[in-house]
Amino acid sequence: MKNIYLDRNENNYGPSPKCLEAVKSVTPDLFNIYSSAYKNGYKSDLSKRLSDDFNISEDRVLLGYGAEDLLKQVVQIYLEEKTDKLLVPDHSWWYYKEIANETNSISIEYPIVEGEESYEYDIDKLLEIYNTEKPKVVFIASPNNPTGNSISDNQLEFILDRMSESVVVLDEAYWFSSNNAKATELVNKYSNLIIIRTFSKLYALAGIRIGYAIIGEQLKQIKKISNRYLGYNRISEKIALAAMDSPDYYNDIATKMKSDRDLYFTELNKIKNVKAFKSDANFVLVKIQKELMSPLKEFLVAKGIVIKFMAEEIVNSHLRITIGTQEQNREVIDAITDFYKQL
Ligand SMILES: Cc1ncc(COP(=O)(O)O)c(C=O)c1O
C-alpha cells in the first residue's frame, strides 16, 4: 500500500517539468566553478531575476537556505541581548519559538483568535502587547501556519504604522495569491519590514532549499551579513529560475488547490462536531472532538493516509491537512466521512 503524506505542507503535484529539464541540462561548470555574478555587480542570477520581478534593487533581495534560514538570520542578527524579545503568534509554526530559544532570547505570544469560519489576527491585542513588551522583532505569518488565515493589507499597514521601533518580519511562505507589486510597495514604505517567501510550497521545491526575502532600507545589518561572497547553490538556482518560468503550471496548481480547500471546507463541515476552517494556504485546519484524535489517526493510518494531528496545547483537538492532489483530497475526505459513519 502506498501511503499518502499530507502532514508537512509539501506540494504533492511536484515541480514544473521545466525544473526537471533544468536538472537534465546541468553542465559540469555548475559543479566546479563559482558563480561569476559578483563580477557583473550582483549576488546571483536568482537574486537578479527576483530584483527585476519585484522592481527593487538587487541588494535588497536576500537568498537563504529556505525561509527557515532567513528567519533564523533575522533572529540571530537582531536579537542580541538575552532580554531582547521576539513577538510570535500563539498559534504558529512551532519552530518560531524554537528559533528564539536557540538565541536564548524571549518569545512572547500574541493571539490569533478563532472566528466564525476562519481564524483572525486580533490587531488591538497585538498592538497592546507590542506596546507593553517593546519587542526587537515581530513575526507575522500570512497565511499563518497552522490556522491558514491571512492578515489583510489594511490590518498590516495599520500595525506597521505603529511598529516602527522593531524589525517586522512578514513570513509569506504560503503566498499562494499575494502579489509582488504590493510586497515591493510595502518594503519601500516601511524601511523596517522584511518579507520572506520560499520555493518550498507553491513551487514544490522543498528539497532544493531556497527561500528569499525583500527588505526595507533600514535593515542594513542583515543585508551585510546575509550576503555570500562565494555565491549560492548554482544548480538549485537554475531549478528555481525554471520554476519562475512556469507560471501556467503553478497557476493551474493554485487553482486546483483553491477549489479543493473549498471542498474540504464544505464536505468536512457537513459532519457533526467537525469544524473545518477557511484557509488561504495549502493546508486546512480542522477541529474535532479531542477523544476522537487517536481513533481517527489509527483509522487513517490503516488506510495509508498520514495527516498532522496537532500536539500543541492550543490546538490539541485539531488536524492540519495538507492539500494534496485532487485524487488524494477526495480520498482523505471520503476516509474521514467513513470514519464518522462507523462511529
Ligand atoms: C510558516 C512557515 N514559514 C517558513 C517555513 C519554512 O520553509 P522553507 O522550506 O523555505 O524553509 C515553513 C515550513 O513549513 C512554515 O510553515
Image (spheres, helix red, strand yellow):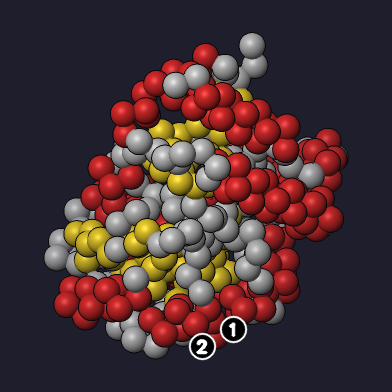
Of residue 192 and residue 283, the one placed in the foreground of this image is: 283
x and y percentages locating residue 195 in the rendered image: 51, 69
268 w.r.t. 140: above or below = above
Query: Residue 209's mark?
Result: none
Above or below, 293 against 65 in this view is: above
Mark 2 CB lies closer than 8 A to ligand 1: no
For label 2, the crowd category at 10 Å Cα-Cα, with few meaning under 14, some 14 to 19 and many 20 or more, is some
- Name the amino acid, label 2: Lys
Viewport quadrant of the N terminus: top right
Q: Which residue was labeled with disc 1?
A: 185
The percent position of residue 101, horizontal first and vertical second, equals 23, 50
Judged left or right of residue 340, residue 73 is left
Q: Residue at x 54, y 29 (%)?
A: 336
Q: Could you tell me which residue is drawn at 32 percent across and 34 percent down?
A: 290
Q: Amino acid at mark 1?
A: Glu
| Alpha-carbon span between mark 2 and mark 1 | 6 Å
Q: Is residue 239 visible?
A: yes
Q: Is residue 230 left or right of residue 125?
A: right
Mark 1 crowd level (few <14, some 14–19, many ≥20, 10 Å Cα): few
Q: Residue at x 79, y 44 (%)?
A: 16
Mark 2 lies on a secondary structure that is helix
Q: Is residue 65 visible?
A: no
Circles 2 and 1, Cβ within 8 Å, touching? The answer is yes
Q: Is residue 91 left or right of residue 306?
A: left
Location of residue 212 by image quarter: bottom right
Q: Position of residue 151 (x, y in %)?
A: 48, 70
Give the number of callouts: 2
Q: Position of residue 208 (x, y in %)?
A: 62, 42
- Residue marked by disc 2: 189
State which quarter of the image contains the C terminus.
Answer: top left
108 or 24, nearer to the observer: 108
Left or right: 30, with 115 as reference point:
right
